[in-house]
Structure formats: structure tokens, C-alpha cells
């Protein structure tokens, strides 16, 4: 069930972007809200049924990135958000994805960090706020950028610990 919720979020990404680009912000707001709720629900379903499965550990962070970054790019295209935080988030997400790929090649799965989850929550909340016409949305987006770069430290530390067996502060 958790993976179905994740796939739902992936499927509604394109209609959400189209709605934003067409100026149908109320439709985009509803879809973005549903996507955000699906992210929370897939985590709950995965934890309720024990640990998330292998595909879910890989699929969920990928879909989170596709969903959030696609919507943010559409918001940049319409002038609703600045491109600077979006480019910073894109760079961070690609860097963490690269690190996760390197780790996976070595047989190490890097699970989402707490700060990574907070970053995703802030991204989704900022998207909903911007689509809802709330000026706090751009502040939340910058908060997501700040937390996202703090989370990089956690991912690097987890990778170094898992790949070398050493404890890193």
C-alpha cells in the first residue's frame, strides 16, 4: 500500500505542474496537498507493516524529489518563487542522490535522515503556502534550503560510518 501511495504522488506530479503553468492555482493547490498527504501516509503504512521494503526505500525519496522539484520549477517559471532556492535544492538533491548511488553500489542503503524528512516537509509546506497565496511560503522554502544543507552532513556521516565501519561525529 505504501508504494501505491508513492506512485500516486508520482502520477499527480504532471497534472500539478500543468495546472500551475495554466494558472489553475486552486487545482494545483489541491493536487499538491494530496501529494503531501500521500507522502505522510506512505510512511505511516510502511511503518505499520514493519520496515519499508527495499523498493520503497529507493522509490519514495526519488518520487519526493520529482514531485517537489517539478512543482518548484513550475513555480519559478510563473515567477511565484525565486530560482535561487530551487537551484540550491536541486544541487543538494542531486548530490544526495549521487551519494546514495555510490553507497548502493557498495551494498549500503542510506535511509532518509530526520533532517531530510524535515526538508521534505518544509518543501511541501512551502509549495502549499505559495499556491495558497501566503507570503510565508517563500520563507519556508528558504528554511527548506537551510535544513537541506544541514542534512547533507547527516548523509555523509551515515555513508562514512556504513562504508568504513568507523564512528564519525
Image (cartoon, rainbow, N blue to C red):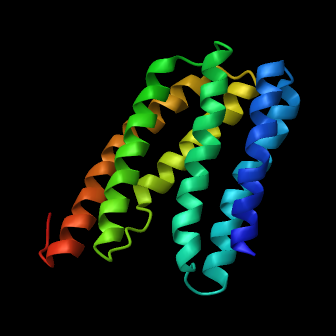
Quadrant for the N terminus in the image: bottom right
**Above or below — where is 83 with respect to 111?**
above
Residue at 11% in and 75% down: 166
Q: Is residue 132 left or right of residue 162?
A: right
Q: Is residue 10 left or right of residue 64?
A: right
Q: Quadrant of residue 4?
A: bottom right
Q: Position of residue 163 (x, y in %)?
A: 20, 73
**Above or below — where is 164 with respect to 157?**
below
Residue at 63% in and 68% down: 43
Q: Is residue 15 left or right of residue 149?
A: right
Q: Position of residue 136 (x, y in %)?
A: 60, 25
**Above or below — where is 91 with respect to 37?**
above
Quadrant for the C terminus in the image: bottom left
Residue at 32% in and 77% down: 107
Residue that extends furthest to the front in the rendered view of this protein: 105
Q: Quadrant of residue 67?
A: top right
Q: Position of residue 21 (x, y in %)?
A: 77, 21
Q: Position of residue 104 (x, y in %)?
A: 36, 69
Amino acid at each position: 500500500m505504501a508504494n501505491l501511495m508513492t506512485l500516486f504522488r508520482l502520477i499527480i506530479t504532471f497534472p500539478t505542474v500543468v495546472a500551475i503553468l495554466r494558472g489553475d492555482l486552486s487545482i494545483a493547490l489541491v493536487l499538491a496537498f494530496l501529494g503531501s498527504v500521500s507522502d505522510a501516509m506512505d510512511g505511516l503504512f510502511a511503518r505499520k507493516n514493519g520496515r519499508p521494503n527495499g523498493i520503497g526505500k529507493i522509490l519514495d525519496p526519488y518520487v519526493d524529489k520529482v514531485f517537489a522539484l517539478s512543482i518548484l520549477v513550475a513555480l519559478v517559471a510563473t515567477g511565484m518563487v525565486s530560482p535561487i532556492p530551487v537551484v540550491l535544492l536541486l544541487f543538494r538533491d542531486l548530490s544526495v542522490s549521487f551519494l546514495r548511488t555510490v553507497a548502493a553500489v557498495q551494498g549500503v542503503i542510506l535511509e532518509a535522515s530526520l533532517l531530510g524528512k524535515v526538508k521534505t516537509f518544509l518543501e511541501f509546506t512551502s509549495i502549499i503556502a505559495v499556491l495558497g497565496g501566503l507570503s510565508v511560503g517563500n520563507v519556508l522554502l528558504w528554511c527548506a534550503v537551510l535544513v537541506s544543507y544541514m542534512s547533507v552532513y547527516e548523509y555523509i556521516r551515515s555513508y562514512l560510518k556504513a562504508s568504513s565501519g568507523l564512528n564519525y561525529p
